[in-house]
Image (cartoon, helix red, strand yellow):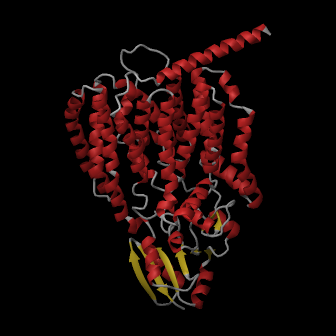
Amino acid sequence: MFRKLFSRAVAASQWWRARAVATAALAAPVALPGVGAAGLYLVAVLVLPAFCFLYGLDAFPLRDNNEGLYAEIAREMLDGGSYVVPHLNGVPYIEKPPLLYWLCALSMHLLGPTPAAARLVSAGAMLLLSLGLFQFCRLHGNFRAGVFAAAGMASALPVAVVSHVVLFDPLLTALLGGSLLCYLHSYLTRSRRAWLAAAVFLGLAIMEKGGVALVLAGGTVGTFLLLMRDGGGWRRLFDRTAVLVLLAVAGTWHVLASGMQPGFAHFYFINEHVLRFLGQRLPDDYHHGPLWFYLPRLLLMLAPWTPFLLLLLPRRGARAQAPPAIVRFCQAAVAFPLLFFSLCAAKADYYLMVALPGLLLWLGIELSQRLAAPDRLLAWCWAVSLGLAALAMFAAPAAMGGDITPPLLLVLLAAVGALAPGGHSLFLRLRSVAARELALLGVAVLAGAALVPLFHAADARSARDSSVYVARILGANPVPDGAVFIYRDFEDMFSTLPFYLGRTVPIIDSASRDLQFGCRRDSGSACISAAQFLQARARGPVAVVLQASRAPEFLAMAGPGRWRAEWVGGKMVLFGGP
């Protein structure tokens, strides 16, 4: 009995010591500026993220890729579809859980079926994550770290751009980030409420993208506990109430979908989780890459803040000491997702977005500690980042249009490097902490301004990247209901067409990988054969949408007849009759 009491007393003392060290990690090394800084913080924490995430949601049409698929699933839910088994173009689509579709459907119900309403879910989630980073830092004693973390999250240009697209990853990043922040707050303060909130957020993350959320959260927390050598922390992970909350939030839909959709269990759990990680998923419609695939993408994802990552390297000559708990957690939140996705056979450019909350929290802590006095490395990082932000404003739109060649890009980067010494000298002349803060936030403001020309350039590409103009051609040349068809291609070519037409569109001899499961299980009228199309054509006028390059193939299949064609951006609409 005495041995047990002694061991518990030792464990309690270790926890209090870890808590004290962790909280000290966020203690501001200098006093906050006076009342005049309130406006600056308001701009950095509220106005800047709101602009970066909410500006331009309707600036360009939905794109013919995954964005079109997910927006159409939400539209079909609103149009009388199933909220348990998502449907895409009229057939079951169960690659992912439905939380993203539910939220998009709710947004479109309130605001109308527009691109902005569908994108508001991704953008709003990332905006709330930025505010959550600030709130976490505020609770633990350092406004400044929260300001930099929130501003960095919002003004990292690739993050802002991806958050303007209907995708799973922005919402997953926000929900998983919220869960991990609540867990860390609970670890530091023993807050029961924060621990249950972490379970709720994790359950929602699982409902958003499946079991990968559980793996990422468990792996991050496990890595953190190993780094902290905290054996007692493992027992808290299996708190009975938190586990029940997690199961209630994440488990109900999985049970209902398994009962309602034949083949769900194998396709969803085995094919979409286990086989996807091993690179054996069918159909094989994902990207592959080497083990180091995500290293350059992680650097690019933080642009223009990438140079500041040098601040996270160990300082030369600094006394070696164990990093505080919050920094250890940030390291785990970056290292485990990087390792997991690097080992995973299925890769995508934006998968590692989930590592950014931990990385930016870590960077915010480091920046808050270096502002006390002029810092040469910080000055170099600021000078290069400012140049990159300016470069993004002028070069990113041209790069999106394919007008910048690699040699020209190298010249522009060399110009940024040539101007960096001047920026370095300028930063070192700033004598006050407030002035250095303002200079750092200037990078965020300049990066946010670059979104304006960037989204204008995206709109200029809409004839190629979206089917909105195809839908307008069909609207100007009406044909009977059910007489519009897509020939073979769907995702990456015509995925937004059903959304803009407001109805499903049958696909002739479908080559779609995303519709493969649904067409096999419940084809209905969504996936038809060439013979079925010829029967429909014999009954009256039809319109067929196809890639212009597939026109000879289609005409050979359709046989003799007169067709009238209209083109837009490499896409063709053929109008014909019996």
Note whether 507 is above or below 313 in the view shown.
Answer: below
Residue 540 is left or right of residue 317, and the answer is: right
Q: Position of residue 10 (x, y in %)?
A: 66, 12
In the rendered image, the quadrant that contains the N terminus is top right
Q: Position of residue 122 (x, y in %)?
A: 51, 52
Taking the spot 39% from the left edge, 40% from the top edge, the residue there is 42
Taking the spot 44% from the left edge, 71% from the top edge, the residue there is 468
Residue 141 is left or right of residue 40, and the answer is: right
Q: Residue furthest front?
A: 35
**Dividing the picture into quarters, in which one does residue 202 lie?**
top right
Q: Residue 548, can we see it?
A: no
Q: Position of residue 65 (x, y in %)?
A: 49, 61
Taking the spot 59% from the left edge, 63% from the top edge, the residue there is 73
Q: Identify which residue, 32 or 430, lies in the foreground.
A: 32
Note whether 540 is above or below 216 in the view shown.
Answer: below
Note whether 92 is above or below 3 in the view shown.
Answer: below
Q: Residue furthest top?
A: 2
Q: Position of residue 268 (x, y in %)?
A: 68, 53
Note whether 434 is above or below 473 in the view shown.
Answer: above
